[in-house]
Image (cartoon, rainbow, N blue to C red):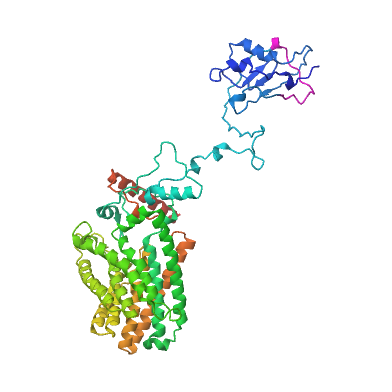
């Protein structure tokens, strides 16, 4: 019996069957039965082309011996190379039946074509072939080119490029310097135009809340709301509020340790040293991170600057640095250099020229329209600078900034009290933002005492104003209920600490049991508030992982979106459905 061998099939030229077969015209392509149950795979011919079929079968060896009654099946596999340049039959394999040692094939004349059953064929990835003809493997497995080919999941999300510095051009230049250039897709422009900064009216129309940090239901965001943004894009300027709260505590404990009226507490100066070091480390970290945001996401920083509330927090870094200078421990430096004061007051002066000029210009950012309690941050910087400068021994500079702060604080105080109809940012309900009312008079009384050399009547007038405002806010029991935590709350803690320090200064001038009790009481309240806020911040950062949510206020559209009423209706329906689902789950 003649054995079937794959070597008997000629491989020099393409079989005529493959030359004339068309997959889309032949039913049952890639599966044809020949003869008595023989199945030829990987070759298909039209039903009306028997000559080609005989041509293929003629390549098989002839069998003259009679066949067994049992039907023996075989398959012929033809593998093709991945490249068309070497298009020919590579190999043919015969798989025999396990019942017999040899497989007998029918003669060519006995070959009968039958219509096979229809089957589904799925395209498979072509494995990469190395130079020596072997299939490239990875850990013993053939790699899937659908994944390694750089699919859609591997592509960089470019929806955030409009908020990057120069629309992402700086990042591409840095990538080229590192030797990892970013490939641009075909047909895509190399420069993505950044959307213009919205006008101040758009912030009022698109946002709501005391801090203008909530998107209205009729508005949409230019960035995906259901996806977590890059960390730098979620890092707000209000993060410097943490520096204000901790650094002011360093000043408080320094005053408690060095004041004669609180000497009975026997507070160690070491507490001031520890808090000052923590404040310095925190300030360095926050400043470094926000500097990275300025470098890589400058367009987002611009939107924060044009935000009616966020713009006031640009004073926070410089005020925090002034707090560090004022609270420096005696073991570190007895008296900082005067040049440090000029270096820190220069950016504050530049910001005031811009913001105060807008208040007076009567344009879109006039004070009657943009006035909100956070504007006290732009006022209190003058009084803090006057306090630090007078403590260093300076005269004219502190008086200059004290005069500027006093003039603008008077105008701001009256504007906020009037609640003009054009003012849209003042919340109707109470909010921790109102504690900023206490900041300016508390620091102003200490600044004037440092300029004059004693706590005279002018300082006492400012202190009593701060005392009344503090008590009027503290008697509200439900003050902190029903509000979502945010980093901006840190900026509202330093007014409490500043008022505690002012009380200690007042007790030094008027020393009695009442003033000493007030000094200790207000110091305990401010320390407890900062400690509670510090613990809450840690929980949100490391447990809940929501300390830095998506910064929606910077992602509003330049113009009011179309079909805003329809969007509001859809969002109201979704909120109602979520409320109903949560109610049902609670009942269950």
The image quadrant where one finds the N terminus is top right
Q: Nearer the viewer, residue 148 or 581?
A: 148
Can the viewer see residue 472 in this picture?
no
In this rendering, position of residue 549 left or right of residue 84: left
**Residue 94 highlighted magenta (yes or no):** yes
Q: Examine the image and state in which quarter residue 82 appears.
A: top right
Q: Nearer the viewer, residue 557 or 477?
A: 557
Residue 386 location, x and y as percent? 29, 75
Q: In the figure, 25 relative to 403: above or below?
A: above
Q: In the figure, 274 relative to 96: above or below?
A: below
Q: Nearer the viewer, residue 282 or 206?
A: 282
Residue 406 location, x and y as percent? 23, 73
Residue in view at x 21 percent, y 64 percent: 419
Residue in view at x 42 percent, y 45 percent: 158
In this rendering, position of residue 512 left or right of residue 276: left
Q: Nearer the viewer, residue 82 or 425?
A: 82
Give the magenta part as a residue range. 93-110
Residue 473 location, x and y as percent? 29, 73
**Residue 268 highlighted magenta (yes or no):** no
Residue 557 location, x and y as percent? 31, 48
Q: In the figure, 406 relative to 171: above or below?
A: below
Q: Examine the image and state in which quarter residue 56 appears.
A: top right
Residue in view at x 23 percent, y 84 percent: 457
Q: Main secondary structure of the magenta part?
A: loop
Q: Examine the image and state in which quarter residue 78 appears.
A: top right
Can the viewer see residue 329 in this picture?
yes
Q: In the figure, 241 relative to 254: above or below?
A: above
């Amino acid at each position: 019996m003649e054995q079937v061998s794959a070597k008997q099939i000629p491989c020099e030229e393409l079989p005529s069957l493959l030359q004339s077969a068309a997959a889309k015209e032949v039913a049952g392509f890639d599966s044809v039965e020949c003869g008595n149950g023989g199945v030829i795979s990987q070759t298909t011919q039209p039903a009306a082309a028997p000559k080609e079929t005989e041509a293929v079968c003629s390549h098989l060896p002839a069998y003259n011996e009679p066949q067994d009654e049992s039907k023996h099946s075989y398959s012929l596999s033809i593998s093709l190379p991945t490249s068309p340049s070497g298009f020919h039959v590579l190999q043919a394999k015969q798989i025999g039946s396990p019942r017999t040692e040899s497989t007998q094939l029918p003669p060519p004349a006995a070959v009968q074509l039958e219509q096979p059953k229809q089957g589904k064929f799925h395209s498979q990835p072509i494995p990469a072939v190395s130079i020596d003809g072997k299939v490239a493997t990875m850990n013993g497995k053939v790699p899937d080119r659908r994944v390694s080919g750089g699919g859609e999941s591997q592509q960089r999300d470019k929806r955030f490029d409009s908020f990057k510095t120069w629309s992402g051009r700086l990042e591409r230049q840095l990538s080229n310097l590192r030797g990892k250039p970013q490939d641009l897709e075909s047909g895509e422009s190399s420069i993505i135009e950044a959307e213009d900064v919205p006008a101040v009216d758009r912030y009022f129309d698109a946002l709501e809340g005391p801090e203008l940090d909530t998107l209205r239901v009729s508005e949409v965001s230019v960035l995906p709301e259901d996806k977590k943004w890059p960390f730098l894009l979620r890092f707000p300027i209000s993060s410097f509020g943490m520096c204000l709260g901790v650094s002011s505590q360093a000043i408080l404990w320094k005053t408690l340790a060095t004041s004669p009226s609180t000497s009975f507490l026997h507070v160690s100066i070491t507490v001031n040293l520890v808090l000052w070091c923590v404040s310095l480390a925190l300030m360095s970290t926050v400043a470094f991170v926000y500097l990275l945001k300025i470098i890589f996401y400058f367009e987002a920083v611009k939107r924060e600057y044009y935000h009616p509330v966020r713009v006031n927090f640009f004073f926070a870094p410089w005020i925090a640095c002034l707090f560090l200078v004022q609270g420096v421990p005696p073991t570190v430096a007895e008296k900082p250099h005067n040049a440090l004061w000029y270096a820190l007051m220069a950016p504050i002066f530049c910001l005031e020229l811009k913001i105060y000029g807008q208040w007076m210009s009567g344009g879109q950012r006039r004070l009657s329209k943009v006035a909100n309690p956070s504007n006290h941050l732009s006022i209190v910087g003058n009084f803090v600078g006057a306090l630090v400068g007078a403590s260093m021994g300076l005269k004219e500079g502190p008086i200059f900034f004290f005069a500027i702060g006093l003039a603008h604080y008077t105008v701001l105080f009256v504007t906020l009290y009037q609640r003009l109809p054009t003012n849209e940012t003042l919340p109707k309900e109470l909010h921790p933002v109102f504690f900023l009312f206490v900041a300016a008079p508390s620091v102003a009384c200490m600044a004037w005492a440092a300029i004059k050399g004693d706590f005279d009547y002018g300082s006492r007038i400012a202190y009593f104003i701060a005392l009344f405002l503090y008590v009027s806010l503290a008697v509200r029991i439900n003050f902190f209920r029903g509000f979502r935590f945010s980093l901006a709350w840190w900026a509202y803690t330093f007014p409490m600490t500043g008022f505690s320090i002012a009380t200690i200064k007042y007790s030094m001038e008027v020393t009695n049991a009442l003033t000493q009790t007030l000094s200790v009481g207000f110091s305990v309240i401010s320390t407890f508030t900062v400690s509670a806020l510090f613990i809450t911040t840690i929980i949100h950062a490391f447990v809940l992982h929501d300390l830095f949510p998506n910064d929606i206020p910077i992602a509003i559209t330049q113009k009011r979106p179309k079909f805003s009423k329809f969007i509001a209706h859809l969002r109201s329906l979704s909120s109602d459905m979520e409320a109903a689902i949560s109610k049902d789950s609670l009942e269950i």
